[in-house]
Amino acid sequence: MTKKFNFDVTATDGRARTGVISTPRGEIRTPAFMPVGTAATVKAMLPESVRATGADILLGNTYHLMLRPTAERIARLGGLHRFMNWDRPILTDSGGFQVMSLAGLRKLTEEGVTFKSHIDGSRHALTPERSMEIQALLGSDIVMAFDECTPFPSDEATARRSMELSMRWARRSREAFGDRPGHALFGIQQGSVYRDQRQESADKLREIGFDGYAIGGLAVGEGQATMFEVLEYAPAMLPEDRPRYLMGVGKPDDIVGAVERGIDMMDCVLPSRSGRTGQAFTRFGVVNIRNARHQDDPRPLDEHCTCPACRNYSRAYLHHVNRAQEIIASMLLTWHNLHYFQELMQGLRDAIAEGRLAAFVSDFHARRAEGDI
Ligand SMILES: Nc1nc2c(CCNCC3CCCC3)c3[nH]c(NCCc4ccccc4)nc3cc2c(=O)[nH]1
């Protein structure tokens, strides 16, 4: 059992690479997709089911957990791993992104952000120091620096001010994090869609020194084409011997394009959130199980899929329980979607390891062009 945090690149294919992140709580195979467990649960899934889909790591959230049940309570109860019965690695986001997208009455200063809880209206403050304290109380293995996700679109001057604030917060995060063997602190690059600012941000983070580097400020409405334009140059600005984490991404074709451009880690609520709305991801595209055309269909969602939903249930059944708003509908579609996302990651890891990523990607796109699913 390794006591420290390590990243080894094991194969490359173009800019893409496979690797292993070693942590005291287990290994993470990269490129990795990380399911989101916002309020100490991956919604509609038991932890053992999340593991069964192939996940090596899941995400927790400083913003949600500081409000309810509070980080201090979770610490008193033995930390987040014990609390949610997940003994493998956990990465926690630093909370700033969620404050800006969820909280009310926000006030942003050099110190940090103050805001009103979206749950009970109580007032709270998040600073780099408080974010580090909360993530330490939770016991997360990979801690994110406290940053501001620059809104899109932003003009160059606004983006620069935001990036420079995040870089000052990155240094405060590093200093507050201290020296915690076996735990990692990741810096987050900002700079919106401006190449010079992305470079300055990367240089600043490298100077401060982090165990991994995230690309922030994307998947915020810029669209896939613009995101890929930034990913043509941003990953290579970050140290190549450290994990590169693209935050909040994404749809399957976003994931494939990001991996091709050198990304090692991604997270997104999409597979779980859309599972609850009846959207199923398959190799042929998205199936909306609520559509009436499924009500007599005896076939599984995807006959090649080995998840419990596809092995044991028909589209007709999934249609029925979704329309009836039965709890099992969320369970089965969430499980299927997380299974599909992890299978996609395994396919990408195998293709990179065998030097056939280009073929995998063209096959991935060709399948999705196929007609009715
Ligand atoms: N610190 C930080 N976090 C970011 C996040 C949150 C990543 N998931 C955190 C999890 C921890 C728990 C909750 C989430 C992002 N998420 C997105 N896009 C999501 C877009 C999306 C939204 C809804 C559905 C699908 C996609 N861009 C992001 C940029 C940043 C960023 O710069 N800084």
Image: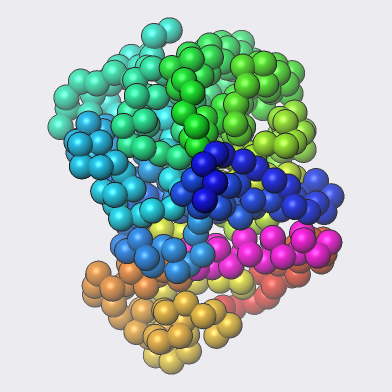
**Image location (x, y in percent) of residue 68:** 21, 37
Indicate whether residue 344 is drawn in magenta: yes
Q: Residue sitting at 62 percent across and 60 percent down?
A: 345
The answer to whether 83 is drawn above or below residue 99 in the figure is: below
Instruction: Name the side, left or right, on which 359 lies relative to 291.
Output: right
Camera sees residue 92: yes
The part of the image, by quadrant, that contains residue 75 is top left
Q: Position of residue 327 (x, y in %)?
A: 25, 69
Residue 102's spot in the image, x, y percent? 33, 33
Which residue is depicted at the point 47% across and 63% down?
Answer: 338
Side of 35 relative to 81 (left or right): right
Q: Is residue 208 magenta?
A: no
Does residue 152 appear in the picture of this structure? no
Colouring mode (rainbow / by chain / secondary structure / one colour): rainbow
Residue placed at 82% from the left, 54% from the top? 13
105 over 284 or under it: above or below: above
Q: Nearer the viewer, residue 220 or 27?
A: 27
Magenta stretch, overall SS: helix
Measured from the top left, where is residue 36 in percent x and y? 42, 50
Highlighted range, magenta: 337-355
Residue at the limit of the structure toward the top, as seen here:
110
Q: Is residue 358 left or right of residue 188?
A: right
